[in-house]
Amino acid sequence: MSRFNSHHNSPNTALLIRAVFLVLALVVVFPTAPVLAQDDDTAEDTAEAEAEEEMHQESDVITVTARKREENIQEVPIAVTMIQGDALEDLAAMDISEIQASVPNLSIYPGRNQSTTLTAFMRGIGQADPLWGVDPGVGLYLDDVYIARPQGALLDVFDVQRIEVLRGPQGTLYGKNTIGGAIKYVSRELTDTKEGRISITPGSFSNQDIKLSFGGPLVEGKLRGKFAFASLQHDGYGTNLFTGREVSNKDTTAFRLGLDFLASDDVTVKLRYDRTEDDSEPKGLTRLAANGVCTVFYGISCPVLDNFDTESGLPPTNSTDSEGYGLTIIWDINNEWQFKSITAHRETDTQNNIDFDTSPARIVDVFADYFDEQDSQEFQFIYTGGGRLDGVFGFYYFDGLAGGLVRNIFLDGTLFPFPPFPQFGTTDGTTKTESMAIFGDGSYQVNDQLTFNFGARFTEEDKNGRAFNAGYLDDTFAVPVLVTADYDQTETFSSVSPKLGLDYQFNDDVMGYVSLSRGFKSGGFNVRAQTLFVPKTGEPFKDEELTVAEVGVKSVLANRSLVLNAAVFTGDYTDVQVSTFTEFDSDGDGTAESFLGDFVNAGDATLNGLEVEFDWKSPTVSWLGVSGNVSFLDTSENFVDTDNNTLADVQVITNAPEFTGALFLNVNQAAWGGLVSGKIGFSYRDDSELTNEGNGTTPIVQEAFDLLNASIGWLSGDGDWSITINGKNLTDEVYLTNGYNIPSLAILTGSLGQPRTVTATFGYKFW
């Protein structure tokens, strides 16, 4: 592949208009916001104090809610990483995919052709298929609310307090579809003091991010509120050479509202609302190999394209609207018991056109519409008695409906006689899920050093799958001529997810733990079924399960200057769900000349790995620190081709590089009346299979690559003003995140990661 060609940036009048509007709004709404001033000596002293605090933060308690109760992260006996929201915003992170380098054994990126569809793999477990019949393998939670579908789930970074990443099966507390792990996005809490901040980030590709938030007491001691807004935009990384339009740009607007009602000293009611509108162009699928089939339909050759460029003839449809409501009631019953109720509703609508061949020819063109809505209710009873026993138990209910209509144009409808092989087809249907679970998780302190950890979750789930897949006469999709699948069936899935473990406090600074846990990912229905020729494709596939044994240590060493955490694990992965192609004989001549998209339980796999995280602050050079992580993952598949069509047994575990690692050099120094901070980050990812087409060909493989990022910033002595310059992918590394490989149609396309960018963030805290 050729190197990325830089684009020249141009001023954007819209950015200036929005900035002026926001400043005027601040002047009108907050005319009394104070501007603090300090003399140089006071500012220098303040900055030195902040620097000192920054360099000794390892001695502070970092609190997480990984086990649904507040705990010191160094005392939680699971592999968990916490990233502070301020750190992400200082690094100008666009969305949660940018936590990848900070978390061992994590792969997270946008969907193949979409900018806000989440694809997440942890320890080799996840799901890249975005259709409604398949569940994710890594659970995403926004303020304790599970987001069931991947569309719109690649959350933007704004108004975030912290992100917690829990690795390994989290079935006990987080339920189904957290078989690989869980990602918890925690937005900023409301406070009883006024808080306000605004930032503007110009940069490469006409980047023009604006983030604004303000909040505080509305009725002193009774009601507090918050409003957060983000406008995130940049020009495209590439161009559609057929239409002249840009591709892989960003055009997202999002906001969040929050209200806290302090009903009494013991009861707090929290109301949250969020909405995101993404109107970006589709991500540009780059043609990685010349397509000879294109000549038949287009009349000219379709050669390899430059990085990020495409040549699609489809209308550039790629929009996602998502919103959610949440109501949380917290009742401190007494000093030992707390009750929490979490009620939520979410819904998403997505339209996306996918040009698999990335050409004006209609070789494989797809028009996809998705929708989903979900309601959930969780009750938690949290016990922290201060004695030997603490824990949580509760009840969870989920009711969700997801579906859509996918219209396919295959080979321009002209190559094969019709019927029996339809060239204009639809995938049309819904999956309705009703799930209930009871759960409990606790810890019993046997003595001052030894603690027994235990938990279990019982889940019962009813799924109804409906499909009406058909072949049509032409591209109007108005006259069906062949029904390929028509089913309406319900299946009940149930599972018990237990967890047992011990942790031992060797001393105040070193804790070791062992655990045995199980998680599962729900079964479902193949929404691409072709029951006319392959009846079994209309049958449900089973749950997949993962049982993991883990040994870990959490420590603060070297006179509390080094935080060092490590985990070793082995997992037994059964009934692995894979998306594959299944061959079939459509004309009765005894030869399988056709294929369909199938979803099957391929077999079993074994996962073994090691993860190490560290954070060191120099005890002698007060401004210097080094942090990072390294991970190892070994996967071994034992997939079986039950249909003797040589497809399922060529499947592989994807998004599972053997080695990943990152090293960050951190500096903090009082200077110029404030605090200067800098970071240089180097991350490495080993060879990784990105696709799992299962059609007898080698999956798309991204060879080992590394990325170099750097930032430098200044924070004023009073903490109000800041400026940060960020450079990402400074060596302009060209790398794939995913793609499509269909050799029979000469399709080999890929979606690329972010090119080199440089941005500057100007921030102001006005309260």
Image: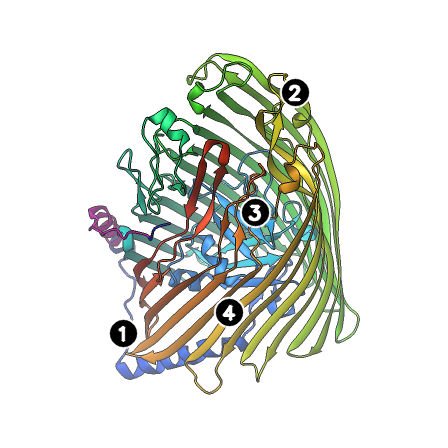
Q: Which mark is residue 590?
A: 2
Q: Which of the 4 image quadrants contains residue 50? A: bottom left
Report helix, strand or loop for mark 1.
Answer: loop
Disc with the residue nearer the chain's start (2 vs 1) = 1
Kindly identify the amino acid type of the residue bearing the numbered disc 2.
Gly
Residue 399 drawn in magenta: no
Kindly identify the amino acid type of the residue bearing the numbered disc 3.
Val
Q: Nearer the viewer, residue 254 or 217?
A: 254
Marks 4, 3: nearer the viewer: 4
In the visual, does 574 lie left or right of 181?
right
Q: Which of the 4 image quadrants contains residue 414? A: top left
Where is residue 342? Give x, y as percent. Answer: 59, 47
Q: Which mark is residue 145?
A: 3
Considering only vertical position in the picture, is 220 above or below 711?
A: above
Report helix, strand or loop for mark 3.
Answer: strand
Q: Nearer the viewer, residue 115 or 668?
A: 115
